[in-house]
């Protein structure tokens, strides 16, 4: 496929771009930070720029098959709330609208695990936490909720459109894993997302699978690693930090408390990397 990746210079984006290229796809990066020869420096908050660039860019592409929309202010507290709202909402609207106008029918967008009630100061209703939970607690997570609602509406307007929102857990690359030992003695240091994470390489595979196998319509998926960031058993962690939260099914060993059952079932996705593999 010919694929636009927005935010392709970022932590997740750079891994996704490399993975898609390795799989044989042609990738065009849209990123304000892109240097000449590395992508197109598109301001995604400018509707005209986005519409024009999606339709075609001289010497780079004259149309694409799919868009992976990762560009965003990526977390709470990075920028003023108003800037986070304006940047994320406008960028996503303009990308979806441009895709619709240009006839691009396959889109994957970066949603967020923050919709699951992070930082979990209010205990979750049950473990494992699944996609039915929508509990935004910041302006950033509110933008991700509204972006999902936009995607649902765009798919209703165009029944042939496929949009997959991926609620990525805390994205990690290999060099991050050395720091995991810092919180092993205190379970509360990482309780804010139920000890979840996602290896960027596994996230990239989930994106490619969604582009390949998803049909028309909207779906959302939690994308987290199969294990947690801790060495201790997951049920033990939950009993210590969230003693009153019930389990809807048994969770064995160090298995994730963020349910990835839906992604496994619908996409045929299975995380292949663990932080423990990098410990030698």
Image: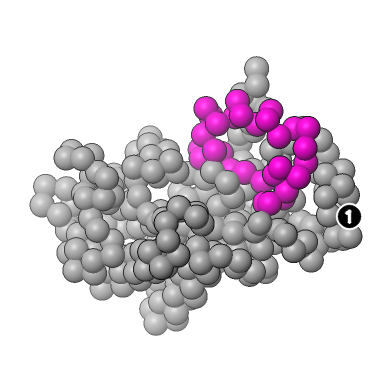
Crowdedness near tag 1: few (<14), some (14–19) or many (≥20) residues, C-alpha within 10 Å: few
Side (left or right) of 116 relative to 95 = right
Q: Residue at x 34, y 45 (%)?
A: 8
Element marked by disc 1: loop
Picture quarter containing residue 116?
bottom right
- Residue 224 shows in this picture: yes
Residue 179 position, x and y percent, is 61, 29
Q: Residue at x 60, y 25 (%)?
A: 178
Q: Residue at x 65, y 58 (%)?
A: 118
Residue 260 position, x and y percent, is 67, 53
The answer to whether 49 is drawn above or below residue 253 in the figure is: below
- Residue 253 shows in this picture: no
Residue 73 or residue 199, whichever sits in front:
73
Residue found farthest to the bottom: 157
Q: Which residue is the site of mark 1?
A: 243
Report if residue 205 lies within the magenta region. Answer: no
The answer to whether 242 is drawn above or below residue 271 in the figure is: below
Q: Residue at x 42, y 61 (%)?
A: 80
Q: How many marks?
A: 1
Q: Which residues are magenta?
A: 172-201
């Amino acid at each position: 496929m010919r694929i636009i990746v927005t935010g392709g210079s970022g932590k997740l984006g750079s891994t996704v771009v490399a993975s898609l290229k390795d799989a044989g796809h042609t990738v065009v990066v849209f990123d304000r930070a892109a240097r000449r020869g590395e992508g197109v420096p598109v301001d995604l908050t400018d509707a005209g720029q986005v519409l024009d660039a999606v339709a075609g860019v001289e010497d780079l592409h004259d149309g694409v098959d799919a868009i992976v929309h990762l560009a965003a202010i990526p977390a709470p507290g990075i920028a003023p709330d108003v800037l986070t709202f304006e940047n994320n909402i406008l960028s996503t609207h303009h990308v979806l609208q441009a895709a619709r106008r240009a006839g691009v029918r396959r889109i994957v967008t970066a949603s967020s695990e923050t919709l699951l009630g992070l930082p979990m100061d209010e205990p979750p209703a049950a473990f494992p936490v699944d996609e039915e939970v929508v509990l935004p607690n910041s302006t950033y997570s509110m933008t991700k909720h509204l972006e999902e609602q936009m995607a649902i509406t765009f798919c209703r307007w165009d029944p042939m459109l496929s949009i997959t929102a991926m609620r990525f857990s805390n994205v990690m690359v290999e060099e991050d894993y050395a720091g995991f030992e810092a919180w092993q003695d205190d379970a509360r240091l990482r309780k804010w997302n139920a000890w979840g994470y996602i290896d960027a390489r596994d996230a990239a595979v989930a994106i490619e699978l969604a582009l390949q196998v998803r049909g028309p319509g909207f779906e959302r998926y939690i994308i987290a690693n199969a294990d947690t960031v801790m060495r201790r058993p997951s049920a033990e962690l939950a009993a210590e930090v969230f003693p009153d939260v019930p389990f809807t099914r048994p969770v064995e060993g160090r298995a994730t408390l963020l349910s990835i059952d839906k992604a496994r079932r619908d996409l045929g996705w299975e995380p292949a990397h663990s932080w423990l593999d990098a410990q030698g």
